[in-house]
Image (spheres, helix red, strand yellow):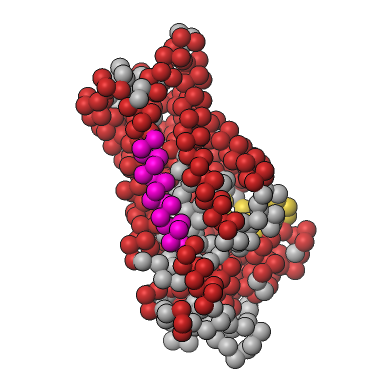
Amino acid sequence: MRMWRPHPRPCLLLLIPLIFAAKAFANLQLPTRAENPARSSSQLPPPSEIPPLVDSTNEQTKTEQYTLSHERYEKAVAYSRAEYALYFVSYILSGVFLFLILRLGIAARFRDVAESASQTRWVQGLVFVPLLRLIVGLLALPIRIYWHRLSLQYEQSVQGWGSWFWDWTKGQLVILAIWLVLALILFAVMRLSPRRWWFYFWFPAIAIMIVLVVIIPLVVDPLFDKFEPLSNQHPDLVASVEKLTNRAGVPIPPERMFLMVASRKTNEINAYVTGLGASKRVVMWDTTLQKTTNDEALFVIGHELGHYVLGHILKGLVAGAAGLLVALYLLFRGLHWSLDRWGRDWKILGAEDWASLAVILLLLQFLLFFSSPAINWFSRMQEHAADVYGLEVIHGLTPNSEEVAAHAFQVMGELDLSDPNPPPFITFWLYSHPPVGERLVFAHTYDPWSKGEPPKYVK
């Protein structure tokens, strides 16, 4: 629901299986900002003409566009531009690091260590994969540190360095476990079918992704944040949400609604839907409930309910599965091409050599980077659909629902320092949600009822 931002928890890598697969291997911390559509952000006035944040207590005020005070505008622009630059720099540096690991023979040395430890292939993997994971994680650490420093500087994060490093350590251990499972299966399949491993590996990979989508909300998320039933502190809100679910015809029991104690680590506001089957749940950050009105929080939940009702996690899994199959084939072709060209220089004996895992990581970097526009376009479409659903499901249940939703985006944008004018290329390449200025205007103007038109989702 929020703007694109890097997040330390690896569970967010599971939004789309292709993103998860590549990031679980490559350890890229991609942004997760939530921005949305309604009007071109390039139409926003310059900072000198931007009025202060509207007062939601004034019933005569209409939130017609995303507005910031001059000071807040300057901070939002500076913070966003710094993040954009760091995003591209992180990709470049990650690629350079992996290339140096190959060019300097580090991957080959790790393989030699693993082979000297045991003649058994899976034992070799248990030695090689942690060594490679360690060096990749340590090389990426300065980028992660700078990103957190940036969030502290702009008062988005309140997490101390000790807590941050502990989260980072836990994240590395989780990613290492994922690396081990995927790598051991991958290289076993490679040995069984050197020419078709890309296809046969697809089946266990998808199975693992589904299992992880199910268990991560139950096992991994609680390692990083505290969760409790939403009904414990906000029974009135749960009762209002039950009205939404009854109206939608999709029961989400109170035990599937959770409150995440985010205020210990961040000033940002957010909510999300996660899990699959028995682990599926709607999660509200406590910061969202602290900094928005009850009606605005209800719209946020309505948006997340839209993801739930419209089956976005399942659709993401299906789309990701198709994308992953294509990616695996491209990896197969790219791996053999790379080894034919540079394998001797890198001291890699073949595709089944453990050291070739570093080549796969490098190729994944390229694949994920150049597939980002398509992946983010898919995500933006889902987020827009969830916005429409949220607007429709609260219509008639909250007074002036369009203004409630528009002001919710205003509050979100101001608190999260959302870029008022993201360049079109940046929106195209990076944004998993439409820009917040567009999202706000859409919320303010979406009114099929007054035009005698049927709503799209909630009849």
Residue found at the far bottom of this picture: 60
Q: Which span of residues is magenta-colored?
A: 80-97
Q: Can residue 410 be seen in this view?
A: yes
Tell me if residue 96 comes above or below residue 67 in the rendering.
above
* Residue 174, x across and y down, in percent: 57, 35
Q: In this view, does 83 lie above or below 10?
A: below
Q: Main secondary structure of the magenta part?
A: helix
- Please name the residue shown 60% across and 37% down the image: 169
Image coordinates for residue 331, horizontal then vertical, percent: 31, 34
In depth, the one of 260 and 453 nearer the eye is 260
The residue located at (54%, 39%) in the rendering is: 212
What percent of the width, then of the height, locates residue 244? 62, 69
- In the image: residue 239, left or right of residue 370: right
Q: Work out whether 272 lies above or below 447.
A: above
Q: Is residue 335 magenta?
A: no
Q: Which of 43 and 299 is in front in this view?
A: 43
Q: Left or right of 243: which side holds 36?
A: left
Report the residue at 65% width, 52% height from top: 159
Tell how many labels: 0
Q: Nearer the viewer, residue 58 or 219?
A: 58
Q: Residue 326: where, in percent of width, then height?
A: 31, 40
Q: Residue shown at 48%/9% (left/top)?
A: 118
**Residue 303 in sight:** no
Residue 264, by quadrant, is bottom right
| 192 sits left or right of 223 in the view | left
Residue 93 belongs to the span the image colors magenta? yes
